[in-house]
Amino acid sequence: MPLPRPVRERCREFLGIDGQIRYIFPAMSHGGGSGFLFVVTDDQVAVLATGPFGEGRPKSVWGSYPRGTRIGPVEAGPGAGFEFGGAFFEVDDEYVPVVNAADAEIFDRDSLPRDPLPDL
């Protein structure tokens, strides 16, 4: 499920970016506790800390990485998770395809579906 527009706008303002947010998804630190938002733009993968309840309000930048940084792979199943930036994060199953798409866009472009209307 996409994150609501207000969350995207809060992240855009917090990061001070004018460009497009390509992907955004919530994650939690392994075992619960701190919430995070992964914000993927054309230039970077920003990890924003949202606090213990992950209410979608960025509080600080946990890390910022070049766009060429791989986010996954995601270990699927109960408590789907991935290691990133030296930490382990958990993500709801519904966001696993978002992580995979963000990585595929950089590392495996041929796996992405073709644009059905490329001339628009």
Image: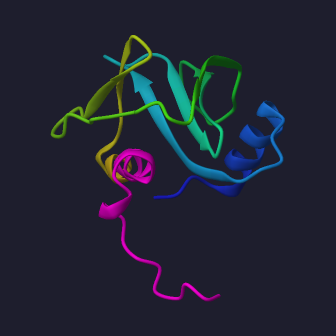
Q: Which residue sits at x=29%, y=46%?
A: 93
Q: Which residues are magenta?
A: 98-120
Relative to 16, say whether 108 is above or below: below
The number of discs equals 0
Relative to 27, say whether 22 is above or below: below
Q: Is residue 82 magenta?
A: no
Closest to the observer: 109 or 7? 109
Quadrant including the N terminus: bottom left
The percent coordinates of residue 63 (x first, y second) are: 59, 18
Among the 4 quarters of the image, the one containing residue 61: top right
Q: Which residue sits at x=33%, y=63%?
A: 110
The percent coordinates of residue 2 (x first, y second) are: 52, 57
Relative to 15, say whether 113 is above or below: below
The percent coordinates of residue 46 (x first, y second) are: 61, 29
Give the image's coloring scheme: rainbow
Q: Is residue 104 magenta?
A: yes
Closest to the observer: 105 or 26? 105
Quadrant including the C terminus: bottom right
The percent coordinates of residue 119 (x first, y second) are: 61, 89
